[in-house]
Image (cartoon, rainbow, N blue to C red):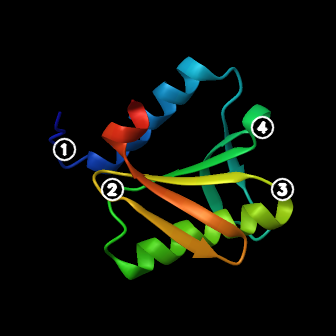
Amino acid sequence: MGFSFSANSGRLLENLVYLRLRQQYKQVYYYQTKNNLEVDFYVPEKKLAIQASLSLDNEVIRNREVRSLVELSKEIRGVRKIIVTEAEEDVIKSKSGRIQVTPLYRWLL
């Protein structure tokens, strides 16, 4: 299975993630930390935080996505953190624990 993204790739990826979350859970929220950092999706019933990003190749983007999840973890203990990307897979170890990086196709399955 493959995905071909257009110029609006980031928005499409984020919309796919949102639609999938809405299929599975009643409550899906956007979360803004006390430090005004944004987390794309937060599912309170599962204590699940998800960032959607095409790629983490750019260090500035990677740091922004990770920092937002770390800040959320300071405010909500025990949250599971995931970054959904177009194709990357990794585990990022942070001060607040592991952040799972998973490609969209695998996350959708």
Q: In this figure, which residue is indicated by the disc labeled 4?
A: 44
> Could you say where residue 42 lies in the image, as x and y percent from the top left?
68, 43
Where is 32 relative to 4, above or below?
A: below
Q: Nearer the viewer, residue 32 or 107?
A: 107
Which quadrant is home to the N terminus? top left
How far is disc 2 from disc 3 in space, using C-alphas?
26 Å
> What's the distance in space between the residues labelled 3 and 1, CA to CA?
33 Å
From mark 1 to mark 2, how far is it between C-alphas?
9 Å
Is residue 12 at all visible to an observer of this figure?
Answer: no
Residue underneath mark 1: 5
State the CA–CA distance, disc 3 to disc 4: 10 Å
Point 63% across, 76% down: residue: 94
**Which residue does the numbered mark 2 point to in the structure image?**
54
Task: Check disc 4 and give the amino acid type.
Answer: Pro
Residue 82 image position (x, y, % from top left) = 55, 53
**Rendered position, 8 above or below 99:** above
In the displayed structure image, the side of residue 72 where residue 87 appears, left or right: left
Q: Which amino acid lies under the numbered mark 1 shown in the image of this protein? A: Phe
Q: Nearer the viewer, mark 3 or mark 1?
A: 3
Q: Nearer the viewer, residue 9 or 94?
A: 94
Residue located beneath label 3 in the image: 76
Q: Callout 2, which amino acid?
A: Leu
* Residue 59: percent from left, percent from top: 39, 81
Task: Report if the CB atoms under discs 1 and 4 are less than 8 Å apart.
Answer: no
Query: Disc 1 to disc 4, how far (Cα)?
Result: 30 Å
**For marks 2 and 3 on the same chain, the one whose residue lies earlier in the sequence:** 2
Across and down, in percent, residue 68 comes to: 63, 66
